[in-house]
Amino acid sequence: MPAAPDTPTACLVLADGTVFYGRGFGAVGTTSAELCFNTAMTGYQEIMTDPSYAGQVVTFTFPHIGNTGVTAEDDEAADPVAAGMVVKWDPSEPSNWRAQGKLTEWLTRTGRIGIGGVDTRRLTRQIRQQGAPHVALAHDPEGNFDLEALVAQARAFAGLEGVDLAREVTCAQSYRWDEQRWAWPEGYTRRTTPGHKVVALDYGAKRNILRCLASAGCDVTVMPATSTAEDVLAQNPDGVFLSNGPGDPAATGKYAVPMIKGVLEASDVPVFGICLGHQMLALALGAQTVKMNHGHHGANHPVKDLETGKVEITSMNHGFTVDSQTLPHGVVETHRSLFDGSNCGIRMTDRPVFSVQYHPEASPGPQDSYYLFERFAAAMAARRAVTAG
């Protein structure tokens, strides 16, 4: 039978034994993951379906979650990838003309656990001070919890260091992508004219990144993360894109770095990377990556373009970062976080090969960073002109 109204029906248990009680919603059961927080004021559905959140439970610092409902148009992947969500207030009834359903029902249907009624401010401070903890999240409508077992489950979670999660979220086989960015009043439209042939390596690619590529004039072929340089070059691409994704870049780099090196050695095609793709490119060029204390997750991160002096308001989601001190000769830092000075972009000095740590497709600026897709397209057009000449 259901628990009494004042009995907690969910709990979040940290590996150090700290327990946060609250009200459960979504799926019933338990899950373990790394805990992070996200400061974005909108986009909870996009966050939950972003493959870069694999292996993580997300604490939302903004209290109004659920108020716009859910709609299939906002999914960044077919289903939620984040393990669960933590919110201050219970999800509200949707009030939005685009809503096709309720957040709570969507979570139940897709097997994701939520907990409301948590002091997310206290929890966020704890994450900032002590680093991203390993946690167990449990939802039981009857309010029965084995705290000792949940602490053990949290402590048994392997963490994200040394873990290759790109294999778990990548596509099973190659496919074409032609859907473009959403625009009023048509919504999503299809690209019908010929464009630059781009191979996009899927380490956990968000759909809106692929839409931005299509809108920038690209005919996109998405390929699995484990594709080889020979697989990529067989497509005779005008450019290669390296997508976002979850996990430890050093682990994914065991197969991604040889592929990138092979492409760079055998071809002069432009290369563009975002997030994990940025880290993969940096590793391939000889730099190193490190685990951050609590990472960057939000839609209000100021990043400075060191070459123009412009400051962009960006969306970020990463727990690892490129160590700018390890960048080799011929590779320069192009962007830097104004929060903590961490690296947010690199480029080769003699080739159109570049990448950024943040997400230009998420448009929190809203259009501060879209020029990166246009730069990629322009580099491919310039190469094609030289080749044709």
Image: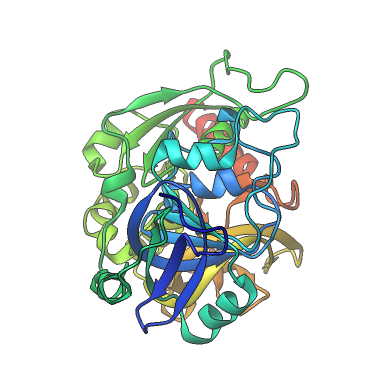
Q: Residue at x 26, y 47 (%)?
A: 167
Residue 355 horizontal/vertical position (percent): 51, 56
- Asked whether the viewer can see residue 357, the reply is no
Residue 388 horizontal/vertical position (percent): 49, 25
Q: Residue at x 43, y 35 (%)?
A: 109
Q: Residue at x 64, y 47 (%)?
A: 43
- From the viewer's side, name the closer residue of 159 and 388: 159
- Asked whether the viewer can see residue 259, the reply is yes
Tell me: residue 356, above or below residue 200: below
Q: Residue at x 41, y 78 (%)?
A: 326
Left or right position of 26 against 285: right
Left or right position of 98 against 14: right
- From the viewer's side, name the closer residue of 112 and 73: 112
Residue 219 horizontal/vertical position (percent): 49, 24
Tell me: residue 65, above or below residue 181: below
- From the viewer's side, name the closer residue of 26 and 257: 26
